[in-house]
Image (tube, rainbow, N blue to C red):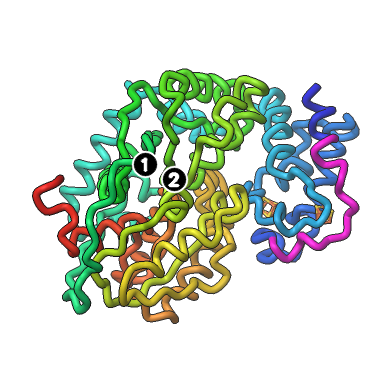
């Protein structure tokens, strides 16, 4: 059944090669097998039972795929590359056990009783280590253990905030908590909630949410991903009048694709899930105080390519007075984080982040902003290892900072 689905996803491919230059691993290696067109041929071979799912020669090229999906929007034929990759990896996982590091991480993320102490230890380590971040001397993946410090910037306000009455309460929203975002980036969740309240939205706490299952699906553990998706769906079905706002690009893409994962059951979330920038830019966004600084935006793959949310984060950042927004060159190219990729494929991951950090260092910016926890950690680790102290944070944290300086929270939160 899944073999037929893989072939159906890949059927539109006419092997034109227009996707090749969008692929980070192809650009690094120049090897056809390390690009989408070559991988499509390998996946078709596995689905047609011409190649064994544990054939090392073939599978190494599928293992080295980031799953970044940059090849999807580049394809004029509409090949569902990401969906085919997950199903192929599921077929591979049935023949070949997952690497132990992936198994440990997937188990941690799926189980709140295991991941909670893990993240608590991480936060304690982050606080204790302060500015001495050993992760910069080791591999970027190690930042998962130390987390990323919230930024501290002290630029003076130069422009007074727009004087406007607080808007009246509107839609009800749930902030999706997830696993890594909740464990290591709770300050971004807090910023998200403050910004939503300041724009008049009514926040509803939906208890029982967990990991979205994206990491599991990307690794081919579709059974594990479905279990997590069903648990989240049950929570959201108890709040049918609420929109679900997500501040992690990877989780947002997964939630929007529950329909593919769960079939008709997943349809119940259709049209209710929004990235935070997408959601805020649909309404009449309040304008806060000035942040006179130069900020670079780097697009998370699962926002830019998988969700097609491109203009909104940039518009949101440009709405902040005096903030000069520039783009990280090749911002749409993966940073090499890609879920557990940086742990399983350290050499390619390091090559990708080094090239991104090199571009960032030429920009002379104070802050890099990107809307995904894995990207924040990977870019921050790369920047720290280069010896720079440029901050890396989420776009909504910038808006929150501007609102805070405008006094929107005074006496309210
Ligand atoms: S995936 Fe699309 S762009 Fe790439 S070779 Fe196939 S048809 Fe061409
Ligand atoms: S998902 Fe990313 S790494 Fe994989 S083939 Fe497509 S562009 Fe290349």
Name the residue located 45 percent from the left edge and 67 percent from the top edge.
297
Q: Position of residue 67 (x, y in %)?
A: 63, 47
**Vertical placement of residue 298 versus 48, above or below:** below
Does the residue at mark 2 contact the one at mark 1 (Cβ under 8 Å)? yes
Label whose residue precedes the other's in the sequence (2 or 1): 1
Q: Position of residue 201 (x, y in %)?
A: 32, 42
Q: Quadrant of the C terminus?
A: top left
Q: Position of residue 2 (x, y in %)?
A: 78, 25
Quadrant of the rendered image containing residue 243: top left
Q: Is residue 146 visible?
A: no
Residue nearest the observer in this picture, 333 or 43: 333
Residue nearest the observer in this picture, 277 or 217: 277
Question: Mark 1 — residue?
Answer: 181
Name the residue located 46 percent from the left edge and 65 percent from the top edge.
315
Q: Is residue 294 left or right of residue 161?
A: right
**Vertical placement of residue 110 versus 18, above or below:** above
**Vertical placement of residue 259 versus 38, above or below:** above
Quadrant of the rendered image containing residue 405: bottom left
Disc 2/disc 1 C-alpha distance (Å): 7 Å
Question: Mark 2 — residue?
Answer: 248
Name the residue located 52 percent from the left edge and 30 percent from the top edge.
213
Element type at marker 2?
Answer: loop
Q: Write down the region rendered in magenta.
A: 8-22
Classed neighbour count for the residue bearing mark 1: other residues with Cα under 10 Å, few (<14), some (14–19), many (≥20): many
């Amino acid at each position: 059944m899944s073999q037929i689905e893989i072939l159906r996803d890949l059927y539109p491919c006419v092997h034109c090669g227009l996707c090749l230059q969008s692929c980070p691993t192809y650009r690094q290696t120049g090897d056809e097998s390390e690009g989408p067109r070559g991988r499509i041929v390998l996946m078709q071979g596995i689905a047609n039972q011409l190649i064994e799912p544990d054939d090392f020669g073939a599978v190494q090229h599928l293992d080295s795929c980031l799953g970044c999906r940059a090849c999807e929007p580049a394809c004029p034929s509409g090949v569902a590359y990401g969906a085919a990759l997950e199903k192929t990896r599921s077929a591979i996982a049935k023949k070949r056990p997952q690497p132990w590091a992936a198994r440990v991480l997937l188990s941690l993320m799926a189980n709140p009783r295991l991941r909670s102490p893990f993240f608590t230890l991480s936060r304690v380590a982050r606080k204790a280590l302060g500015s001495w971040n050993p992760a910069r001397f080791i591999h970027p993946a190690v930042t998962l253990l130390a987390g990323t410090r919230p930024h501290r910037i002290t630029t003076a306000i130069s422009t007074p905030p727009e004087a406007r009455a607080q808007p009246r309460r509107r839609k009800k929203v749930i902030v999706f908590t997830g696993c890594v975002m909740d464990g290591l980036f709770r300050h971004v969740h807090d910023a998200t909630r403050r910004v939503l309240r300041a724009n008049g939205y009514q926040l509803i706490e939906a208890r029982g949410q967990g990991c979205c299952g994206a990491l599991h699906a990307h690794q081919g553990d579709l059974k594990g991903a479905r279990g997590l998706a069903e648990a989240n769906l049950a929570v959201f079905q108890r709040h049918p009048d609420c929109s679900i706002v997500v501040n992690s690009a990877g989780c947002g893409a997964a939630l929007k694709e529950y329909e593919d994962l769960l079939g008709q059951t997943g349809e119940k979330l259709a049209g209710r899930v929004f990235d935070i920038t997408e959601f805020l830019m649909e309404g009449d966004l309040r304008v806060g105080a000035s942040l006179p600084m130069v900020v670079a935006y780097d697009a998370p793959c699962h926002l830019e390519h998988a969700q097609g949310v491109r203009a909104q984060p940039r518009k949101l950042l440009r709405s902040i007075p005096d903030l000069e927004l520039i783009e990280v060159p090749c911002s749409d190219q993966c940073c090499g984080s890609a879920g557990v990729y940086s742990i399983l494929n350290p050499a390619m991951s390091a090559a990708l982040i080094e090239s991104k950090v090199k571009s960032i260092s030429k920009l002379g910016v104070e802050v890099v902003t990107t809307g995904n926890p894995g990207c924040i950690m990977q870019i921050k680790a790369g920047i720290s290892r280069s010896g720079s102290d440029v901050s890396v944070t989420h776009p909504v944290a910038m808006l929150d900072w501007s609102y805070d300086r405008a006094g929107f929270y005074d006496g309210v939160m």
